[in-house]
Structure formats: C-alpha cells, structure tokens
Image (spheres, rainbow, N blue to C red):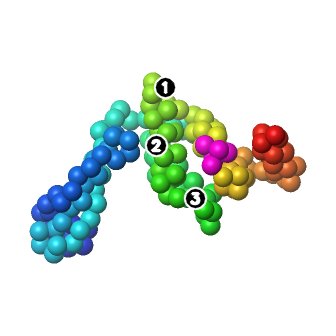
Amino acid sequence: MQCPMCHQKTSRVIDSRPSDEGRAIRRRRECENCQFRFTTFERVELTPLLVVKNDGTREAFNRDKIMAGLIRAAEKRPIKSEALNKIVDRIENGIRTSGDMEVPSKKIGELVMSELSHLDDVAYIRFASVYRQFKDVSGFMTTLEEMMNKED
C-alpha cells in the first residue's frame, strides 16, 4: 500500500478490525520509510450498480455522492458522521439486496429522504429543497406540512 505522505510502497499493518457491520476491514498501517500512520479499508468487490439518471443516462453507483449530499444537508447540525455513514450503508445494502443492477436516481433520492426524515428535520428539509427542486414557496410549504403531519 502506497504511503500518502512519502509515496513509498512498503507499509506494515498495525491493526485490523471489521468495519461497516462486517462488510469491510479497517486497517491501520505504518509506512516503513517515514513511519507515517494511515487508515485503509478493504471491501469485497461487488457487481457494479448502475444509476439511471432522470435524462436516461447511466453512471456507476457512487456512495461518495450520497455522502456528499448528506454532509451538505447536515451541515451545522448535531449529526455525527457515523450516523451519516450508517445511512449510506443502509441505502447501498438495500439497493444491492434488491437484486436490481440498475436503480433510478429518483429511488436513491427517496431512500435518502426517508432516512433523513427519521434522523433530523432540518437536514431533511435541506435535502428535500435541493432534491425536489422547489420552484416556489408553495412546494416548500407542502413538504413542511407533510413533515409536520407525520409527527402527529
């Protein structure tokens, strides 16, 4: 494994432990050249998932895109990154266990909104405002009312 600091290709594993509910291995490594410590993750390589965009184009599933959207929605909110990682894990696992190799981006967006609705109302509204592309205040108010009614 190449050291991110000195780019030497020799490192040793200091610690290994399961991560992501047993679906990955987290390894702490130390560069044998500069003694810089870094973390790597090892995952099973799965059959590629394709996301079908609204315009019909397809692209490879990218969990980092979901995480980026969650981070933007949760900015300045009391939400731990561990909770966001678990959301991404649940979404990816749900899609993979469905058996479909192609998933509409709309389905992914709805899964993210469902997860956020249980986690944090403000993050949910932030994500919904971007995802649903509100054209006016009435669309925004409708979403707010739906959210407030679900709590009753």
- Which numbered disc flags the more N-terminal residue, 1 or 3? 3
Q: Which residues are magenta?
A: 115-119
Crowding at mark 1 (Cα within 10 Å: few <14, some 14-19, many 20+): few
> Main SS of the magenta segment?
helix
The residue under label 1 is: 98
Residue 98 vs residue 53, the one in the foreground: 98
The residue under label 2 is: 89
Q: CA distance from mark 1 to mark 3?
A: 28 Å
Q: Where does residue 106 sit, x and y in percent of width and height?
A: 62, 38
Q: CA distance from mark 2 to mark 1?
A: 14 Å
The residue under label 3 is: 79
Q: Quadrant of the C terminus?
A: top right
- Residue type, numbered disc 1: Ser
Q: Where does residue 46 sit, x and y in percent of width and height?
A: 34, 35
Q: Is residue 103 left or right of residue 128?
A: left
- Which numbered disc flags the more N-terminal residue, 2 or 1? 2
Q: For mark 1, give the secondary structure.
A: helix
